[in-house]
Image: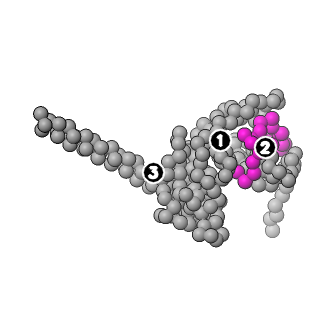
Amino acid sequence: GKEWQELYPPMHTARFYSGVLAIENLVIVSGGYVNKHIDIIECLDIKNKMWIQSNLKLPQPLSLHHMALCGEYIYIYHFSYGFWRMNKKDFMASLTSLKPVAQEWERLEDAPKNSSLLSLSMQPLLVGPSGIFTYKKKWTQISEVTSYDYACTARACTASLNEKTFFTFGGKGKGEYQTSAVQYDIAVEVEDTSLKEQGKKDTSLKEQGKKDTSLKDEY
């Protein structure tokens, strides 16, 4: 039968609990744990089968973190320590620079804890015990945990199928480790949220109309 083959050379730094992201012909391995949290970034050049020790570092030593490419930004999320991003163009230039680089990670608004990060419709999405959130200048909740208990487990594995659908696997929920595999269509929730906001605006306009009518009656 077929067996796994080691086709590439080993990394420069041994580690585990790293964050991983694939962009174009590069696989980026960031941070991890080696007796302590580390901030080292290496990238595997798949075409040339070689590792590049990058001068770019993580915003702080991290392990058990997630990385995602969403639109024009690279995002880093840690379930406890925070949420950062860097412009993709700056990230790629810094990643392979032969000279020391200035760290340009932007720390963003604190994110919901114990969640999992994935990219969906060019935006970062967090799925966890607090619910499902998207980020665009601020975190917006698009689904409450009570509706999707098994999709919103703590620190589950996640994967996006397309711009509308993602999966969650396992995680911890209701005090127990889960074996669930859940498919979730986010487009419905986004549309519903949009309609709710539009409904609030319509209601506000109606209320304003009543006030205007009331003022006319007074005169």
Q: Which of the two residues, 192 or 162, is positioned nearer the viewer here?
A: 192
Q: Residue furthest front?
A: 218
Q: Amino acid at mark 1?
A: Trp
State the separation of the CA atoms marked 2 and 1. Answer: 14 Å
Judge from the rendering whether residue 120 lies leftward or rightward of residue 4; answer left or right: left
Task: Report helix, strand or loop for mark 3.
Answer: helix
Q: Is residue 42 left or right of residue 112?
A: right
Can you identify the residue that label 1 sits on? 84
Task: Specify whether residue 133 is painted magenta.
Answer: no
Q: CA distance from mark 2 to mark 3?
A: 35 Å
2 or 3: mark nearer the eye: 2
Picture residue at 58% right of the left edge, 40% below the top: 71
Does residue 62 show up? Answer: yes
Q: Which of marks 1 and 2 precedes in the sequence?
A: 2
Could you tell me if residue 42 is visible in this image? no
Which label is found at residue 190?
A: 3
Q: Quick check: 133 left or right of 177? A: left
Q: Which residue is mark 2?
A: 39
Amino acid on which the number 3 mark rests in the picture: Val
Report the coloring of the rendering: one colour
Q: Which region of the structure is painted magenta?
A: 39-65
Quarter of the image containing the N terminus?
Answer: bottom right
Could you tell whether 168 is left or right of 205 in the image? right
Q: Which residue is located at x 53 percent, y 42 percent?
A: 138
- Which element type, helix, strand or loop, lies under badge 1? strand
Dominant SS in magenta: strand
